[in-house]
Each structure stands twice: as structure tokens, then as C-alpha cells.
Amino acid sequence: MQFQNLLTYLSYPIKAVVSRSFYIDVMFRMKGVGLVYLLILCAALALPACLQVKEVLTKFKALDLPSVVAQIPASTISPQGVLEPINPNDTAPLVIRNTRGEAVMFYNLENVEVKGVTEQPPITITSHAAIIRTGEGSINVPWTSIYGNNGAQFEPLEAAGVLEQVFSASFFSIWVVVTLWFLSSLAFVVLVAASLTKVFSLMIAKTKVNFVLALRVNAFATTLIGFFTLAQFYVNFSLSFIVMCMVPIVYTMSVLSMVRRDIVRALKDPYFALSKKNPFLIWFDYQSRLLPNNTLDRGPEFEALTVEQQQERIENLKRNTARGIDLTTAVPDVNFFAQKTAKAEYGSHQSREERPFDNQEVQNNQGPYSFDENAGLDDPIFKEPSQNNEKAGSVRSGNKGEDSSFTP
């Protein structure tokens, strides 16, 4: 059983990339898992990335790079990222060799061709960047990416000592650093994508989703970006920040559109609403069991009923869910279904007396799923964009069984 659970967990990244229905589980059955998943994903992606980093560090260590860096003229780096030698006489191009006499670095601030220099060292130092030549092309490392926009003073001996420490770092230390780098990059993408999801969910998917749920879904939807980021360690290509943010948003909008489609279909087609194909079956099943006198039908499942009993359930469902709802303008609140589905599933593991749908709640009409005959469009499942909108800045007191809300 534990091995099967392990296989299930290991399949999460693949499902997050290829399975849209997987996000139904993410929404309704994985509360509090988003950050943990993102941390584990980053730690896993950092392992193959560390192998590449370690290989690159080994190659640079073989060049005896600390002794080469120690020969660079003392310089300053301006806030604009411009490297300038402290001594004005140190601006001339210079080929720097290691202790074995191998040409390792070309100090060429203007990055111009110099007559008489036929050697092509793997590293070139210019006024704006360090250029590293590899078998797959050149990599430009701007000074601002290393020292930021605050400016700094470049001390050759100090830099050589830092390189010595980096080259002698253990695999575990490199793995921790790369993991934190992955986590900071992907977490920022998730934060931006979740904020945009709040806006686009109403505009595109016509579905309401709260920020916490948007964070959780986007944490899983960022999996593909994690794979692309890992690929950058092995293939020389760049991924813009806009693309990194848009990929999880596309995933999320697709999922929310599917959610709205299923909710609307369930409201129109009671047989689909009470079938196991409906991801919101638990909530709709409860509504079909809620009788006109606010008592609960504890009978068998819908498929096991006779035709007459099924019709009675359908009538209950229509009465409790579809009254006064305009399906062309109603905006389903996905978070409502997420909370209620999770609570109902938690209750399914308890005895009938301990479940959240107890008889006392139903009799007092105070349960989270109780139906108020006078509620109309105040049912928290739907938020009408064109009707009953509270004035901006107002606080609406919730009825029994629903939370208060603030309209910004």
C-alpha cells in the first residue's frame, strides 16, 4: 500500500502537465499541499541541475581559475554595471594565463579585435559582462546580474578566494543553493500567476476563485515551467518572464472553464449531476436528499433507487439548486464547492451521527448546506455580476450557514 502511495505521489508532476482532470483533485482534495509540492518539486529538479553545475565547476577548476582571476586589475563596477579599472593605465587588452601557461582569460574592456592576438581563451572580460565560450555557444553574464544595481568594488584576490570556496563546495551545499534558487524563481511566478488568475477567472472563465485556491492550482500548474527551467541548465536558451507567468495561467483558465462547464451542466442535467462523472457529486447528492420539510433522505445512492425514487431526488435537486438562477449570467464560486466537498468527504469517513450533515443541523435549518426558501440568489454558490451587487466598500452580513463578505 505504501509503495502504491509513493507511485501516486511520483505521478503528480506528470499529471500536473498532461491531465486537466487532475486539477479537480488539487482544488478539492489537496488543501495545504501547494507549497509542500512546490518545495519537493524544486528539490527534485535541483538534483539533475546540480550535476550540470558540478560538471561546470570541475571544468573551471581544471583551468586554475583562482590564479587567473587574481591577475585581473583592481576595478570598480558602477551602478549601471560598467567595469572600470581603478588605474587608468590598466585599460589595455591583456591575455591572462594560469600557472601552467595556458591562456584562460582575455581582459578586453572594449571587446574589440586586437592585432597580434591569435589565442581564443574561454573567458573574456568586457566592460559590461563576462563572456564564457562553450561548445554550444557563448554565454553573456552581465555584471549587474552578479553585483546588482548598487555598484561594487572588484578586488581580484578576494574574488579568487571566493572561487576557491565555490570549487571546494560539497554536492549537498550546491544542491541546497540550487533548490533555493528554483524555489524563489517558481514561487514568484506562482504569486504573479495567482494574482492574474483572480482577474482573468471572472473575465475569461466566468468563475470566482479565491486567492488561496488560485495559489494552490498555480503551484501545480508551474510544473512545466520547472521542467523548462531545468532544461536551461543543459540547453542554451532563455525563457522570458512573461512566458513563465502565462503558462500556469493558461492551465488554470482551462481548468476553471471546465469547472464552470461541469457546474452548469449539472444544474441543467440532473442525471449528470447525480452521476459519478460529476466532480461535484457530493454537493449535488446532498441537495437531492434535502426534503421540503428540511429533513434529510438517508436512502441509498441514486443509481440504486427505483425510477419513482430517482424522480423524487431529481425534484429535490431542482428545487434546492435551480430556483431563481440565471445560468447565462451566474458566476460559480469554485471555493464554495472546494470547501463543501472537502468537508463532505471528511464526513464520509465518520459515522452518520458525526458527519457534518447531521439531523440537528437540518432540523434547525442551520447546516452549511441548508436551503432557505427565501434566499433566492443569495445562495453562496453563485455571485451575480448584474444583480444584487453590494455597493463598493460595504460589508454584507452573512445569513445563517454562510460567511460575511466585503465588497472592495
Image: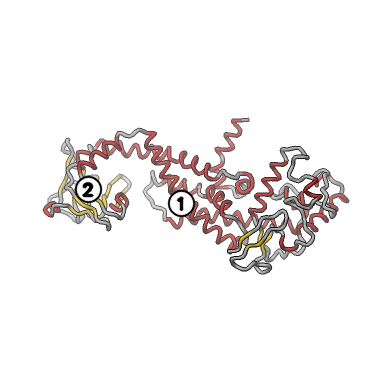
- Using the image as rendered, state which of residue 124 and residue 282 is in the foreground: 282
Separation (CA) of disc 1 from disc 2: 30 Å
Q: Position of residue 402 (x, y in %)?
A: 69, 55
Residue at screen point 86% across, 49% down: 309
- Using the image as rendered, state which of residue 399 and residue 141 is in the foreground: 399
252 sits left or right of 280 in the view: left
Q: Position of residue 206 (x, y in %)?
A: 62, 62
Q: Which residue is mark 1?
A: 188
Identify the secondary structure beneath mark 2.
strand
Q: Which mark is residue 156?
A: none
Q: How many C-alpha atoms fall within 10 Å of the one at disc 2: few (<14), some, or many (≥20)?
A: some
- Using the image as rendered, state which of residue 169 and residue 50 is in the foreground: 169
Identify the secondary structure beneath mark 1.
helix
Q: Which residue is mark 2?
A: 154
Q: Which amino acid type corresponds to the residue marked 2 in the rendered image?
A: Phe
Residue at screen point 38% across, 37% down: 51
Residue at screen point 67% across, 45% down: 342
